[in-house]
Image: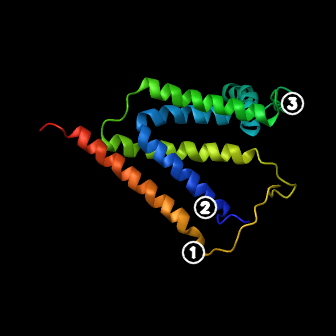
Amino acid sequence: MSLPFTETQCFYVAILVFIVIGFQRGWKRELVSLVFVLLGVFLIRPDSGKTFMDFLGRLPQVFGFLVTGSSSSGGAQTPAQTTNFFLGPWGAIVLFAAIVGLGYYIGNKAFPKPGTPHERFLGVIPGIVAGAFILAYLSSLIPKTATGQSLFTVAVQAPDPGNFVPVLFLIAIVAVIVALIASRAKKAGGGKK
């Protein structure tokens, strides 16, 4: 049995989930969790850590150039070593999930629930960004061949509009839930006049 989804459609469905989460939590809470998502991606992803270490290794040369005006190098640079986690890729995933979970927890404790609909709608933006970074991190963990193609393949059917009825129904249900949440927030804010 083949999935009726393409890789792009799965990405958009996952982003839709992050949109709903961002809408429910509001922009203040989502901004705190976005900082932790970016911190987790930056600290745990090996290539971003290597890039940062290369940047730090070049800082003395930059300061030397700014002070003296010459571009002499102080010695041979050694490439930064990537860190292997204690449980291999599972250790990295667990650590990343812990950092992201801590961000969501701190965001919930630091700020109250959003009171107005515009606070909720602004939460969609950091929700999308956090979701995109989480998905990018998770997709970077999938092994690839020498040509850059994923080792995991999913047999995808040719697009047939009849296959997307359940997806459209699910999106319609989510849209109704979002509309009910928005109307409930509007009623709660406009009690007394």
Q: Of label 2 and label 1, which has the lower sequence position?
A: 2
Relative vertical location of residue 123 with respect to residue 177 in this rendering, above or below: above
Residue 117 quadrant: top left
Determine whether the residue tagged by mark 3 lies in a helix, strand or loop. loop
Residue at the image point whose x is 66% and y is 64% from the top:
6
Whole-angstrom CA distance, mark 3 to mark 2, is 42 Å
Q: Nearer the viewer, residue 38 or 181?
A: 181
| Quarter containing the N terminus | bottom right
The residue beneath circle 1 is 161
Left or right: 43 with respect to 116? right
21 is higher (above) or lower (below) than 90: below
Q: Can residue 55 be seen here?
A: no
Around disc 3, counting alpha carbons within 10 Å, would you say few (fewer than 14), some (14 to 19), or many (20 or more)? few
Q: Which is closer to the viewer, label 2 or label 1?
A: 1
Hey, what amino acid is under mark 1? Answer: Pro
Q: How is the image coloured?
A: rainbow
Q: Which residue is mark 3?
A: 78
Residue carrying label 2: 9
